C-alpha cells in the first residue's frame, strides 16, 4: 500500500493537481493499492492557516506517508512578500528533513520527436545547503552562502544520471560545471570522468548558450543544484512552456516505511495572478504524477506511468492547445478542466482496452 500525502501549496498549486487527483481517486476506487492524505498546508498557505510555512502537522503527515504530491510553493494572492517573506523555504526544509537529496526533472518536448530532456542534480548540499550553513546579513555585515560538495553524494548523482543516459544511448549526455572557477566544479568534473559514462564536460555559460541555440537538445544534463535550477527553465523555454516539466526530489536509498522517500511536483511556480482562472496548463502536474507512479514499488508494476504519458501525448496531439502553447491568434483554446477531461478520457479508454484485451 502506498500512502500519498497531498501538499498543494500556494497560488495555482491547488487547482493544478485537480486532474491528477481525479485519476488517483479513480485508481483507488478501482482497487489500486494507494491511500491519499491531505490536503496538508505548507508555504504561504501554511502560514495563512497556522502561522508557520511548514506546520508540524504537515511534517507529521509526511512522516506517515511514502511520497508527496505537491502543486507549487511560493507567492499566493492577497499575501505580500512583506507578510510572508520566503515561503519557498518550506520546500527546501522538507527536502532536508527527509533527505530528498537528488532532483530529477523531465522536460517533455511534445511532438517534435526529439524526446525528453532529463536534468539530474544534487538538491541538498552544494548551493542548496541547509539554511543553518548560511549567514544572513543585517545590511552591514557580509552575507554568506557556502557551497560544499561531498564526493560520495556526487557519485550517487552521477549513477542516477548514467542510468538515464544508458536509456537514450543515441542522445548526447552532458555534465555541466564551471571548473575554471570553482573547486567544487573541479571535483564535479573528476567524478564525471570516473563515472564510466561518456558525459561531455560543458561550462555552464556555454551550456546555456547551446541549449538556446542548437536545434538538438541533449538527452541528459547532470549538474550542480543551482545550475540545474536555471538550465531546467532554459530547457522548458525550448520545449515551449514552463508547464512541460515534471520535477522529483528523491532520496536514492528508497527505504519505504520511514516517511516520504520522494516529492513530486510540476517545476513551474505558483502564478498568483492566474490563481483561480483554471486556464493554466496542468501537464507538469501530470508528468509529476507519472514519475510518482513509476517510483513506488506497489504502483510501478501496474504500468500506469506509461499510460499517463500516452494520454498526455494524445491530448496534446489532438488539440486544442492550452494558452501557453497556442500560436498567436489561436481560438478555441483548451482550459485546465477541458485538458484534464481529455487526459482522463484517454486513460479511461486505455484501461477499458486493457481490461477487454
Ligand atoms: C524549483 C524552484 C525551487 C528550487 C524553489 C521554489 C525553492 O525554483 O523547483 O525549480 O529552486 O528548487
Ligand atoms: Mn526553479
Image (cartoon, helix red, strand yellow):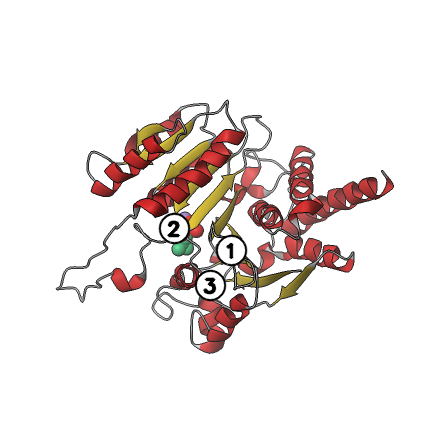
Q: Nearer the viewer, residue 190 or 137?
A: 190
Q: Secondary structure at mark 1?
A: strand
Does label 1 or label 3 sit earlier along the sequence?
Answer: 3
Residue 226 is situated, as x and y percent measured from the top left of the image, at: 33, 46
The residue under label 3 is: 76
Q: Secondary structure at mark 3?
A: loop
Q: Is residue 203 above or below residue 129?
A: above
Q: Secondary structure at mark 2?
A: loop
Residue 8 is situated, as x and y percent measured from the top left of the image, at: 55, 61
* Residue 11 in the figure: left or right of residue 17: left
Res. 319 image quadrant:
top right
Q: Look at 43% across and 69% down and name the residue there.
A: 53
* Residue 262 in the figure: left or right of residue 332: left
Mark 3 and mark 2 in contact (Cβ < 8 Å)? Answer: no
**Number of other residues with Cα within 10 Å of mark 3, as a class: few under 14, some 14 to 19, many 20 or more:** many
Q: In 3D space, how far apart are the residues under numbered discs 2 and 3 (Cα atoms)?
A: 24 Å
| Numbered circle sitting on residue 263 | 1
Q: Look at 52% across and 64% down and name the residue there.
A: 259
**Number of other residues with Cα within 10 Å of mark 2, as a class: few under 14, some 14 to 19, many 20 or more:** many
Query: Is the CB atom of the residue marked by disc 2 within 8 angstroms of ligand 1's nearest atom?
Result: yes
Q: Look at 53% across and 53% down and name the residue there.
A: 264
Q: In 3D space, how far apart are the residues under numbered discs 1 and 3 (Cα atoms)?
A: 21 Å
Q: Nearer the viewer, mark 1 or mark 3?
A: 1
Does label 2 or label 1 sit earlier along the sequence?
Answer: 2
Quarter of the figure with the N terminus: bottom right
Does label 2 or label 3 sit earlier along the sequence?
Answer: 3
Res. 322 image quadrant:
top right
The residue under label 2 is: 123
Q: In 3D space, how far apart are the residues under numbered discs 2 and 1 (Cα atoms)?
A: 12 Å
| Numbered circle sitting on residue 278 | none
Q: Is residue 87 above or below residue 163?
A: below
Q: Look at 69% across and 41% down and name the residue there.
A: 307
Amino acid at each position: 500500500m502506498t500512502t500519498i500525502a497531498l501538499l498543494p501549496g500556494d497560488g495555482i498549486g491547488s487547482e493544478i493537481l485537480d486532474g491528477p487527483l481525479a485519476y488517483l481517486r479513480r485508481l483507488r476506487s478501482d482497487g489500486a493499492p494507494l491511500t491519499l492524505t491531505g490536503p496538508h498546508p505548507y508555504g504561504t498557505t501554511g502560514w495563512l492557516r497556522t502561522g508557520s510555512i511548514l506546520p508540524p502537522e504537515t511534517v507529521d503527515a509526511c512522516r506517515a506517508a511514502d511520497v508527496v504530491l505537491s502543486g507549487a510553493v511560493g507567492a499566493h494572492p492577497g499575501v505580500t512578500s512583506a507578510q510572508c517573506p520566503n515561503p519557498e523555504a518550506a520546500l527546501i526544509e522538507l527536502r532536508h528533513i527527509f533527505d530528498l537529496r537528488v532532483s530529477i526533472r523531465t522536460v517533455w518536448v511534445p511532438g517534435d520527436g526529439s524526446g525528453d530532456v532529463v536534468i539530474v542534480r544534487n538538491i541538498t548540499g552544494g548551493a542548496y545547503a541547509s539554511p543553518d550553513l548560511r549567514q544572513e546579513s543585517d545590511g552591514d555585515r557580509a552575507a554568506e552562502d557556502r557551497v560544499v560538495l561531498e564526493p560520495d553524494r556526487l557519485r550517487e548523482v552521477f549513477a542516477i544520471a548514467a542510468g538515464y543516459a544508458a536509456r537514450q544511448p543515441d542522445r548526447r549526455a552532458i555534465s555541466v560545471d564551471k571548473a575554471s572557477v570553482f573547486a567544487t566544479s573541479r571535483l564535479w568534473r573528476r567524478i564525471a570522468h570516473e563515472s564510466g559514462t561518456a558525459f561531455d564536460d560543458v561550462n555552464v555559460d556555454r551550456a546555456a548558450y547551446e541549449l538556446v541555440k542548437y536545434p538538438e537538445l541533449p538527452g541528459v544534463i547532470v549538474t550542480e543544484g543551482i545550475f540545474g535550477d536555471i538550465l531546467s527553465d532554459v530547457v522548458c523555454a525550448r520545449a515551449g512552456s514552463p508547464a512541460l516539466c515534471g520535477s522529483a526530489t528523491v532520496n536514492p536509498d528508497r527505504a519505504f516505511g520511514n516517511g516520504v522517500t520522494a516529492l513530486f511536483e510540476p517545476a513551474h511556480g505558483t502564478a498568483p495572478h492566474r490563481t483561480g482562472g483554471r486556464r493554466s496548463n496542468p501537464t507538469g502536474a501530470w508528468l509529476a504524477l507519472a514519475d510518482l507512479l513509476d517510483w513506488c514499488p506497489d504502483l510501478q508494476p501496474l504500468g500506469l506511468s506509461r499510460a499517463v504519458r500516452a494520454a498526455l501525448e494524445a491530448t496534446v496531439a489532438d488539440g486544442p492547445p492550452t494558452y501557453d502553447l497556442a500560436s498567436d491568434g489561436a481560438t478555441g483554446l483548451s482550459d485546465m478542466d477541458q485538458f484534464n477531461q481529455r487526459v482522463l478520457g484517454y486513460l479511461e479508454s486505455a484501461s477499458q482496452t486493457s481490461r477487454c484485451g
